[in-house]
Image (cartoon, grey):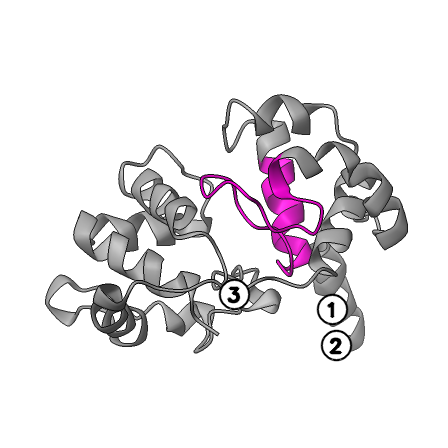
């Protein structure tokens, strides 16, 4: 009886549809239209567009689905994602996850304040340390779907933190990022974003 109950609970916890398995080679072919913004190796040449190389596949999958379904909006990405099938998304996600990220450099003036916020947070503002979710090296936690945030353009990270702060971006689970970014000053956002660009 207990085994049946446990099995029943497990089945109830499963998503109603199976998630498509991604194929790296198919993703590489489908990424031909992504190269213009995200670079031929997943490392963008424009600091306002994200590096995708080395990002966790499930995180990429969620973001593309959110763009497609309107939970996240961007004038360039939303129309592109609208045309993607679940299989397209799965293929692109595993392809970009297979690529190597390029670590950048932080400005010297942001190293100390950025490191302090990332590693210790700000107790006075009730802000938890970023590394509690994203790890000591900023490589994230794929099991919890916390993204890799190191080796990302400082400009892009700053834009996203400000979007969370303004609640213009609201596709974070349980509002965690909106809460954290809402406690940060613009100077703090800039420092931690720049620190992350060179974190490895």
| Residue 86 visible within the image | no
* Left or right: 189, with 78 as reference point: left
* Left or right: 57, with 21 as reference point: left
* Left or right: 85, with 102 as reference point: right
Along the line of sight, the residue nearer the viewer: 159 or 22 = 159
Along the line of sight, the residue nearer the viewer: 107 or 186 = 107
Q: From what the image shows, is residue 102 above or below residue 165?
A: below
In the rendered image, residue 157, in percent from the top left (x then y), is placed at: 40, 50
Residue 103, numbered circle? 3
CA gap between label 1 and label 2 equals: 5 Å
Q: Main secondary structure of the magenta part?
A: loop
Of the numbered discs 3 and 1, the one sitting upstream in the chain is: 1
Label 2: which secondary element:
helix
Question: Which quadrant of the figure has residue 191?
Answer: bottom left
Of the numbered discs 3 and 2, the one sitting upstream in the chain is: 2
Q: From what the image shows, is residue 149 above or below residue 166?
A: below
Q: Which residue is mark 1?
A: 5
Label 1: which secondary element:
helix
Please give the range of residues in magenta.
37-66
Residue at (76%, 45%) from the top-left corner? 92
Label 3: which secondary element:
loop
Q: Which residue is mark 2?
A: 2
CA gap between label 3 and label 2 equals: 50 Å
For the residues labelled 3 and 2, say whether their Cβ atoms are less than 8 Å apart: no
For the residues labelled 1 and 2, say whether their Cβ atoms are less than 8 Å apart: yes
CA gap between label 3 and label 1 equals: 48 Å
In the rendered image, residue 95, in percent from the top left (x then y), is placed at: 77, 53
Residue at (26%, 53%) from the top-left corner? 189
In the rendered image, residue 65, in percent from the top left (x then y), is placed at: 64, 37
> Magenta stretch: residue 21 in it?
no
Structural crowding at the residue carrying mark 1, measured as other residues with C-alpha within 10 Å and reported as few (<14), some (14–19) or many (≥20): few
> Magenta stretch: residue 52 in it?
yes
């Amino acid at each position: 009886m207990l085994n049946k109950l446990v099995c029943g609970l497990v089945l109830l916890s499963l998503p109603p549809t199976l998630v498509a398995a991604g194929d790296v080679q198919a993703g590489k072919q489908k990424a031909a239209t992504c190269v213009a913004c995200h670079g031929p190796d997943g490392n963008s040449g424009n600091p306002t567009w994200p590096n995708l190389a080395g990002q966790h596949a499930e995180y990429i999958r969620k973001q593309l689905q959110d763009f497609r379904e309107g939970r996240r909006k961007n004038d360039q990405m939303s129309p592109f994602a609208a045309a993607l099938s679940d299989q397209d998304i799965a293929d692109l996600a595993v392809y970009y996850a297979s690529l190597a990220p390029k670590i950048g450099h932080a400005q010297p003036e942001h190293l100390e304040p950025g490191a302090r916020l990332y590693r210790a947070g700000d107790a006075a503002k009730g802000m938890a340390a970023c590394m509690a979710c994203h790890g000591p090296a900023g490589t994230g936690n794929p099991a919890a779907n916390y993204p890799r945030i190191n080796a990302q353009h400082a400009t892009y990270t700053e834009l996203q933190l400000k979007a969370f702060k303004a609640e213009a971006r609201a596709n974070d689970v349980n509002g965690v990022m909106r809460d954290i970014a809402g406690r940060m000053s613009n100077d703090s956002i800039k420092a931690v974003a720049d620190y992350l660009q060179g974190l490895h």
